[in-house]
Amino acid sequence: MQSLATSAVYFCVAIIELLIGVRVLLKLFGANEVALFVRLIYDLSHIFFVPFEGMFPSISFALGSVLELSAIFALVVYLFLGYLVNRLIELIRDSLTHQIAQGKGKQPPKEAVKEKSTPN
């Protein structure tokens, strides 16, 4: 069963992947940067693309088509980071669950337990 935290990470990674993926397609198809939708996607994806911008050369084709290799690399990195964060969350959750199952979690003080078990 997925926790709320892992679901949130999957959701965030999916949004980032969608924005960068659409960016790659728009650049590849040579979309007009003046169009509102194209500008919106470029602006929204820019913050996630900046760390990778210029890392690899972009390949230009005829009619303004561009293949941004840096953006494709960013897709792979964000997917991997999402996987790592989710694994970390699962490891912490499993560790805490194991500790609680072994009785190392929070337990009520012994005095409180004795008071509840003594009938009045």
Image (spheres, rainbow, N blue to C red):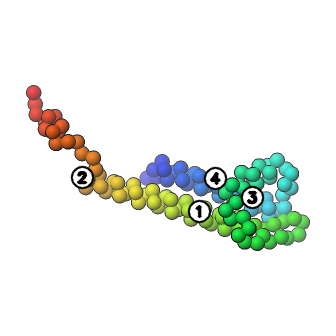
Picture quadrant of residue 111: top left
Crowd rating for badge 2 (residues with CA inside 10 Å; few <14, some 14–19, many 20+)? few
Q: Is residue 75 left or right of residue 42?
A: left
Sequence order check, earlier mark of 4 and 1: 4
Residue that label 2 marks: 103
Picture quadrant of residue 30: bottom right
Residue that label 1 marks: 79
Secondary structure state at the residue bearing disc 4: helix
Q: Where is residue 58 in the image (x, y as percent from the top left)?
A: 78, 70
Residue that label 4 marks: 15
Q: Position of residue 69 (x, y in %)?
A: 73, 69
* Structural distance between the alpha carbons of marks 3 and 1: 16 Å
Question: Cβ–Cβ below 8 Å for labels 3 and 2?
Answer: no
Sequence order check, earlier mark of 3 and 2: 3
Residue that label 3 marks: 23
Q: Which amino acid does label 4 sit on?
A: Ile
Residue ID at (16%, 42%): 110
